Image (tube, rainbow, N blue to C red):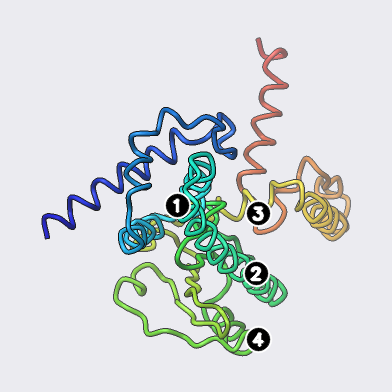
Amino acid sequence: MKNSSANNARNMDLLSKLMFQGYEADCLTPKANLDNLLPELEQVFQMSEETFAEFLKLADTHHVTVRALRVLERAAYDQQKSQLQQWCQDALRTEGIRISNAVEWLRVIVNALQDSGCRVSVIKSLDHWPDLGSDLDLYTNGAPERVIRVMQQKLKAELEARSWGDKLANKWNFCVPGLPELVEVHVRYLGQTGEQALMARRVLERTLRSRLCSPLERWEMARKMRKLGKRGYGHIEAAFGPDWCKGHFGDHGQLTLSRYEDRMRALEPRLA
């Protein structure tokens, strides 16, 4: 047990150094010169296949497999460690296939939910990129019944039994045929006990503020002005326009607040 703990601690230290000292400033390109890591790399060069498998398991647990192995593969090539280089290439190929499959399924799942009226955002899963988490996490403000219906009818997913923690967090887990990873859908709340309602709203609003969604925002704003601008009957509401249009999709509170703050800043010189 002590040996196992010591090995894990040593491998964690090695993974940390590969991640934080093995890359250029862009955090994407392995360093051409890895001499600063030679003492640590020597540990890997001496690993047996079994020991290397344990090292890989720990890297996978912490979602750093791709990033760690890219540095190791470079070092193995430079030091002519052909066996280690082959192990790295095999593991990277396997992980690449898993990630490609998961991302493709992620696209299908998001589209299915969006097309059924459930606004959805990917959370956590892509935070490790170019690595990927062990499950796929989504957030939606759609009704639970609709989410379950879409997942079961459109994607043939099997609904997993919910733990007390799942119920507190208001989330559902699905097993999708052809997808090894579980799909975890947080509905209307975030946090271990569903306490972060405001954060959940901001997740969707951040998506709405993106350049991709700008045309949708403009369309919804124009639709509201056309609809509500006709209800004035000679009163002030007849002038309903951009200055009166509160929010777009779901009131989009952050966008409304930002525009209010912009107007206040514009008024400051006149009030001084």
* Residue 251, disc: 3
In the rendered image of this protein, does residue 52 appear above or below residue 74?
below
Q: Mark 4 is on which residue type?
A: Lys
In the rendered image of this protein, does residue 192 appear above or below residue 144?
above
| Pointer 4 residue | 154
Comparing marks 3 and 4, which lies closer to the viewer?
A: 4
Comparing marks 3 and 1, which lies closer to the viewer?
A: 1
Q: Position of residue 24 (x, y in %)?
A: 55, 31
Residue at (14% x, 55% y) in the render = 3
Disc 3 and disc 1: Cα gap in Å?
A: 39 Å
Disc 2 and disc 3: Cα gap in Å?
A: 22 Å
Q: Secondary structure at mark 3?
A: helix
Q: Position of residue 183 (x, y in %)?
A: 50, 73
Q: Are marks 1 and 4 in contact (CB under 8 Å)?
A: no
Q: Is residue 232 visible?
A: no
Around disc 4, counting alpha carbons within 10 Å, would you say few (fewer than 14), some (14 to 19), or many (20 or more)? few
| Pointer 1 residue | 64
Earlier residue among tags 2 and 3: 2
Is 157 placed left or right of 169 in the picture? right
| Pointer 2 residue | 110
Around disc 2, counting alpha carbons within 10 Å, would you say few (fewer than 14), some (14 to 19), or many (20 or more)? some
